[in-house]
Image (spheres, coloured by chain):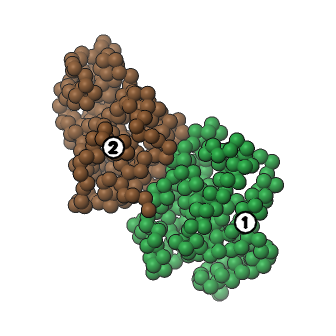
Amino acid sequence: MTRRPSYDPAAGPNGRSPKRSKKGKNHSANGSSRFYGMPLPGVRTEDLSGSLIVVEGTDGSGRSTQISLLTEWLEGEGFAVETMGLRRSFLVGEDIDGLLAENAVTRTTLALMYSTDFFDQLERRILPALRSGLIVLADRYIFTLIARAAVRGIGRDYLHGIYDIALRPDLTFWLNVRPEVAFDREFKKSQTISYWESGRDMSLSNDLFQSFIRYQSMIKREFEYLSKRHSFIELDGEANVSKVNGLLRKRIASQLGIQSTKYEPSHALAHLWR
Amino acid sequence: MATVTADISIAPQSAPERVAAAKRPYPGALVVVEGIDGSGKSTQLYLLKRWLEIGGYRIHFTEWNSSPLVKSATRRGKQRRLLTPTTFSLLHAADFADRCERQILPLLHGGYLVLADRYVYTAFARDAARGCSPHWLRNLYSFAPVPDITFYFRAPLDVAVNRIVAGRPKLKYYEAGMDLAISLDRAESFRIFQEKILTHYDQMVETDHFVLMDGTVRVNKLQKLMRQLLGERVDLKQFAPKKK
């Protein structure tokens, strides 16, 4: 029998199943704890010298902006950076775009296509980058995928079971914003609200605003649970960009042993600095 | 979905009682054939299907890896050899989920006798042979309804392998398990890969209540037995044409 993962996937959001010691977070002592459970087939954890830093948060939380700024800062400090995100795999990224556009896909299929997309990036792009000592900035990670599927009624234990073989991040930031604020920001940006970001497939409301708020509130509840379970570093995503970025830099600098956290965006990124 | 998820258990040793006691949440029935390539399973299921079709039964036939949904991704992955054991497995699971949610489950709820050429056990055996954890695989497919009967066609490895190798000009890369780097010779790699798969299948005979079928028995004789066993396990009257 395979050993159980080091966190209990059977626990629901209100589950109070016994938690193992927090030792798992310090992966330096034990190579295998860089994974949640069984490592991916064929991966030697001691080969992974880079760092994996995850930024999670809903659309409108400022996630992508922060990742652009962090990339520039880290490159300025001499670190090579690789990024990953949703639907960016060569294998199925475009196929998922197609499925979303068609809007005829069922929930389990979509969840599994996203997990294929995730593991294709992880195995063929991210693990090689980490072997080469790069800093990987993940624009969302397994947590968004788990939350989205869970609010659609797919079992949390099932989802945790799939992502059990994923790499455990060194740091996970959660840019937390209220759904109302996310709505304002998204609307300002695109003059509309996307079908999927408002959970329209779930028939929550015919009113797009109501649907968006209800859906994002459900997602947020999943994140509150995930945040505790996986020790997220929660940041106020409603604060201004430079302040959030300062907090991110401080925490990352201490993780990577960077002395100075001074940073001014270049001319190219100055428009993001508000 | 919750009504059918618990059946294919993550813990195989606890499955037998549960399967036996399972009250299906649908009026249909699911008949599955499994076995390595060349074991004769597809021929036998085809004959079973013909028999039921001719009799006017309410049936539907489905086969592994036939959904158009992930075809382009599978093709891309296979042509360029991008698939790892994990993504190979996930892509097939996505494909199966599509078939399960849009075809198999609605048909079972609609009272059909569903005939499946290969089912989740194919993934359990093949992906485990590729190095995926059996525990992980059981969880991955836990949304699949448990078959009413699973015929496991078993032929000696040499017989099965010879049937395939003789009938095919060239074995495909993944089919031959070349991604496992067992051997540079495709035929040899195929043979060793099939042997691993066979071992995993054999382990499921008890845990998953396979009905063992001897693939070396004459085709018509084996078919007769298959029809008899099906009748014992599944109430075929339920699917028979209604008399007016």
Q: Which mark is residue B156?
A: 1
Residue B59, quarter of picture: bottom right
- The residue that appears at 73% across and 66% down in the rendered structure is B156
Residue B239 pos. (x, y %): 61, 80
Residue A92 pos. (x, y %): 52, 41
Residue A54, quarter of picture: top left
For the residue pair A45 and B173, the one nearer the viewer reads as A45
As drawn, is A216 to the left or to the right of B136? left
The colour of chain B is green
- The residue that appears at 32% across and 28% down in the rendered structure is A67
As drawn, which residue projects farthest toward the bottom?
B244
As drawn, is B229 to the left or to the right of A38? right
Q: Check contact, mark 2 vs mark 1: CB within 8 A.
A: no
Residue B131 pos. (x, y %): 54, 51
SS type, badge 1: loop
Residue B52 pos. (x, y %): 70, 76
Camera sees residue B44: yes
Camera sees residue B31: no
Chain containing the residue with disc 2: A
Q: Which chain is brown?
A: A
Q: Residues within 10 Å of mark 1 (few under 14, many from 20)?
A: some
Q: Which mark is residue B63?
A: none
Q: Residues within 10 Å of mark 2 (few under 14, many from 20)?
A: few
Could you give the CA–CA distance between mark 2 and mark 1, rounded to whole angstroms?
A: 44 Å
Same chain assignment for discs 2 and 1: no
- The residue that appears at 69% across and 83% down in the rendered structure is B228
Residue A170, quarter of picture: top left
Q: Which residue is mark 2?
A: A30
Viewport quadrant of the N terminus of chain A: bottom left
- The residue that appears at 62% across and 85% down in the rendered structure is B232
